[in-house]
Image (spheres, rainbow, N blue to C red):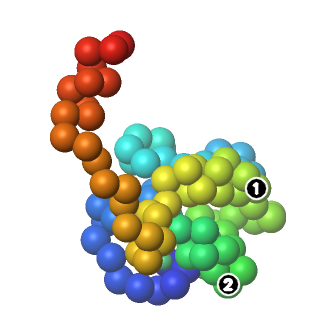
């Protein structure tokens, strides 16, 4: 929504309004009007700055997006330039055993 790039719904984060607060709704279970943004800070900032987010959510006042931003910070895709660290064979099984 913010960057206006088209994306599959699966790639987007649903957000909905609880009071004046924009909350993340990754499972799409919360009632009410929802808006979709990329789980990406830049996209979120754009959506807020362009007021497309408050408009989509029919918000009357300024929105609190603290929790939404926090979610995005935790879940946004790592920068493309950074390759994921190589994973040693069997690392996942080892974790299971030590638990
Ligand atoms: Zn976007």
* Residue 33, position as x, y percentages in the image: 50, 57
Q: Quadrant of the C terminus?
A: top left
- The residue that appears at 26% across and 24% down in the rendered structure is 94
Q: How many marks?
A: 2
- Local packing at callout 1 (Cα closer than 10 Å; few below 14, some 14-19, many 20+) is some
Q: Nearer the viewer, residue 44 or 52?
A: 44
- How far separated are the C-alphas under marks 1 and 2? 15 Å
Q: Residue 24, can we see it?
A: yes
Kindly state the secondary structure of the residue where label 2 is placed: loop
Q: Residue 16, can we see it?
A: no
- Local packing at callout 2 (Cα closer than 10 Å; few below 14, some 14-19, many 20+) is some
Check disc 1 and report the residue beneath it: 64
- The residue that appears at 49% across and 60% down in the rendered structure is 76
Check disc 2 and report the residue beneath it: 50
Q: Are marks 1 and 2 in contact (CB under 8 Å)?
A: no
Residue lying at the far front of the rendered structure: 88
Disc 1 residue: CB within 8 Å of ligand 1:
no
* Residue 77, position as x, y percentages in the image: 44, 63
């Amino acid at each position: 929504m913010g960057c206006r790039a088209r994306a599959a719904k699966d790639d987007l984060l649903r957000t909905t309004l609880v009071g004046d607060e924009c909350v993340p709704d990754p499972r799409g279970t919360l009632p009410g009007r929802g808006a979709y943004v990329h789980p990406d800070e830049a996209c979120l900032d754009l959506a807020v700055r362009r007021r497309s987010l408050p408009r989509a959510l029919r918000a009357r006042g300024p929105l609190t997006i603290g929790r939404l931003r926090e979610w995005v910070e935790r879940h946004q895709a790592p920068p493309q330039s950074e390759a994921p660290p190589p994973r040693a064979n069997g690392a996942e099984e080892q974790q299971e055993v030590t638990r």
